[in-house]
Amino acid sequence: MSLGKLCLLFSRGILVLFLQFSLSEYRNVQNPCYLKREFYPNYQKDGDLIIGAFLSVWKQSFDYNKPRFFRSTPPFHGETYRVLSKEYQNFLAFQFAVDEINKDPHLLPNTTLGFQIFNNFHDNIITVENSLKWLSGWGRTIPNYSCGKQQKSVAVIGGRSTPLSITLANILGLYKIPQISYGSFDSLLTEKVKWPYVYQMAKRDSTLHLAMVQLMLHFGWTWVSLVLSDDMKGEEFFKDIKEEMDGKGICLAIKKIVSQMSRNEYHDEIKFILRITESSSNVIIIYGDTNSLHELLSAIVHRRFHGKLIVTTSSWDFTISDFDGVSVDFHGTIVLSHTNIDVPDFTDFLQTVNPIENHEDIFLKAFMESLFDCRISEETPGEMILNPCSKSFSLAEVDPTKLDMIMTDLSSNVYHAVYTVAYALHEILQIHSKETSEFEGTPEFSWKLHSFLKCTNLDDSSDETCRDKASLAPESYDILNFKAFSNLDEAFVKVGKVNLGKPFPQGIRIYEEDIDWPHDFLQTPSSICSQSCVPGFRKAAREGEPICCFDCTRCLDGQISNQTNAEQCLKCSEDQFPNTERDRCLPKTVTFLKYGEPLGIALTSSALCFSLFTVFVLGLFVKHRDTPIVKANNRSLSYILLISLTLCFLCSLFFIGHPSTATCLLRQTMFAVVFTIAIASILAKTITLFLAFKATKPGSRLKKWLGSKTSFCLILICSLIQMCFCGIWLGMSPPYMDIDIHSEPGQIIIQCNEGSIIAFYCALGYIGFLALASFMVAFLARNLPDTFNESKFLTFSMLLFCSVWISFLSMYQSTKGKFMVAVEIFSILASSAGILIFIFAPKCYIILLRSDINTLDLQKRKADP
């Protein structure tokens, strides 16, 4: 044996002696060699093999001013003790399992199980005393001595809480007695060096945090408070659930550790209740067992949670009704419980149990008397005298709020613990059937159980040989809803299940229509720090606050968010754009100036009408070419001007319709050349008109410049210069078809890119230069005397032309897409129409309506004094 184990055994021996002599001194025992008994085990059943049960149904109240005392039966009517009625189901489950095994011909044949039930009062000192009595038998309780009927005892089931399990282990471990704990799993008890003979029936809560988080995700609870027991289980649960919450974006609003209170700390607990009540979190996760959370329940009694939903586990029995006479409303509480194997016969068993037929069961009598407040037995111990019961009561008449008729988690652990011991005994008897007489009744018999009990709980076993017995079924939890009805009945209703073998959300199934929420909530409660960001917005974290507390920021232009609480906005593809709500991308509309749309129809109709009118004027001038008004205005230049104006109107049609490479190359260059010819024709007309009057003076040298050749040369030179500009433009950076997806939201603009914008403005500026020159010459010749002097009309036409194109420059820069094209077409049509109207309208008027003045005689009469 190693030195460490020797030291451990020595320390345990010192502890046992200290407790024994402390108990002897405390109870004023005269003989220090044995403990004076104040009461005996109340219920036992003989058998070939005996299983001990150290259970708890009464609990001592925390009144530190009163001394501890014990009687023949628990003083349930006294002020020092209170009844935990639902704990009595553990006693019944233990008896039910023993009865089932004894009736089973295939399990432990020819061998009966007996039992001894002890009530530990949830108290460590009483647990020590009971363990010593169980070891010493029915005689005097002699320390470190085992005799009598206890030689048939093989194992102990006990340990409602970890402290009670450790107390039992310190005594029973000295004798290698197998101890099976039925309380909540605690990794502290897995330390086999300290407690090598302790086994746990409860499953480890290693996956409980996953089920909790799935429940939060299902209901959208991202801002929760957490209340934990002050023990290692609480620390482990907090570590696991905090890591899982962080990974799923769930934040912790408040964390509170529930510790054992002293009177000075009680007001701190009340402040804690106030803090949780005033917090913005509507959901409180509570983790711990009934014993560790007693102080929390005590604080809730005096200051209840208002407007909060409690989510807890079945380990905490918050339904304790006899709590200082105060009832706490837990209606709507959500409880997670391990999915247990249903035991259908257990309910039938409870229906048959009554204190008359089970007259030896003092626990049953005391339990029934405490519930019905009457006397069943001849003498009822305690300080109060009760009236006899008027009838025989059975468990079938017990209020379900006092005793669950369906096996709970703890009772299920007790039930399966009995079967675990029975199966282990059965295997021993099968293996050693021929040698039973040799080892039966010896202490070594219970020692042999250890090799068969090591795989009791795989979470509690480090033995590799146990891994072959591991269940491959995934962990699952039942979701229960606690309902308090108007007739004071209470019940846990199964409303869903969490199967951790499947990913979220397939692994959780909840029937929300079956859930009753707390009275403060009219619908499913929400628990969030910030309101969810609707699609179209993204979350913007607040500096210095948890990630669950955020502001909602609208997505930028060109971006969307199509889900609630989006972390980032998504950018739409280039051929899409966000809708007004910015929650989805819509395909962009391909847009250009179409012939079929109203604007295109109007511009096309205007261009055709003006071009037809120009052709009409041209035909009119050709028809009346020999009239004085046509001759006086240089009919050759008028023909050229009218033809160029016709082409100007028609070239605007190249700007309408789907752009192509050909139209992009032609439309600006054609516009520039044709307009240059038109303006050059006007310039030639104004110069010819000006020279004609100056050349009439004697000896003038200007006569040689008069004639059609000069005008044609001027037009040709001006046109060639513009052609050179256009040639350079096409050679260096020609216009091309372009797709603009950024200028207009929701639109893909198909347009002609001018290529070199400098070349475009040079071509336009050259036309403007010619127009300005024509305007100046015409302005100088406006007052020259002549019957058909058109210099004034040329002046107005050029003034209009310059005004239109100066306006075009500013509008061209401020418009986009098809409207920019429409502005240019309008400028072409307006300037061309202005030239046509101002120059040719008066002449047409004279030709058509005033032919009487279209004669040379009128001109001569005006020339005479």
Image (tube, rainbow, N blue to C red):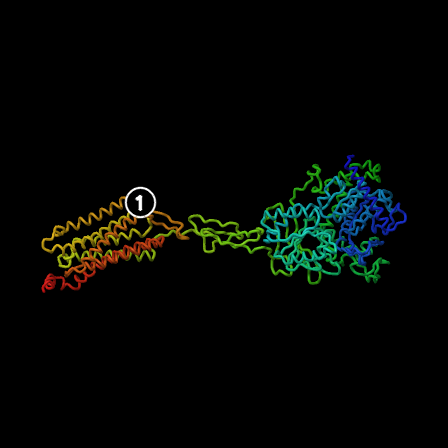
Q: Residue at x 14, y 63 (%)?
A: 851
Q: Could you classify mark 1 by the number of other residues whose Cα lies within 10 Å: few (under 14), some (14-19), or many (20 or more)?
A: many
Residue 110 in percent (x, y) is at 81, 42
User: In this figure, what is the number of numbered marks?
Assistant: 1
Residue 389 in percent (x, y) is at 82, 61
Residue 802 location, quadrant: bottom left
Q: Secondary structure at mark 1?
A: loop
Residue behind mark 1: 734
Instruction: Give the camera-side residue of 149 and 743.
Output: 743
Q: Residue at x 16, y 61 (%)?
A: 847
Q: Quadrant location of the C terminus? A: bottom left
Q: Is residue 839 left or right of residue 228?
A: left
Instruction: Give the camera-side residue of 121 and 857.
Output: 857
Decide if residue 733 is in sight here: yes
Which residue is at the far top?
Answer: 1
Q: Looking at the picture, does residue 664 appear above or below residue 855?
A: above
Residue 595 in percent (x, y) is at 32, 54
Q: Amino acid at mark 1?
A: Pro
Which residue is at the far right?
Answer: 30
Decide if residue 407 is in sight here: no
Q: Is residue 193 left or right of residue 603?
A: right
Instruction: Give the camera-side residue of 197 and 708.
Output: 708
Q: Quadrant location of the N terminus? A: top right
Q: Is residue 437 left or right of residue 470?
A: right
Residue 59 in percent (x, y) is at 78, 54
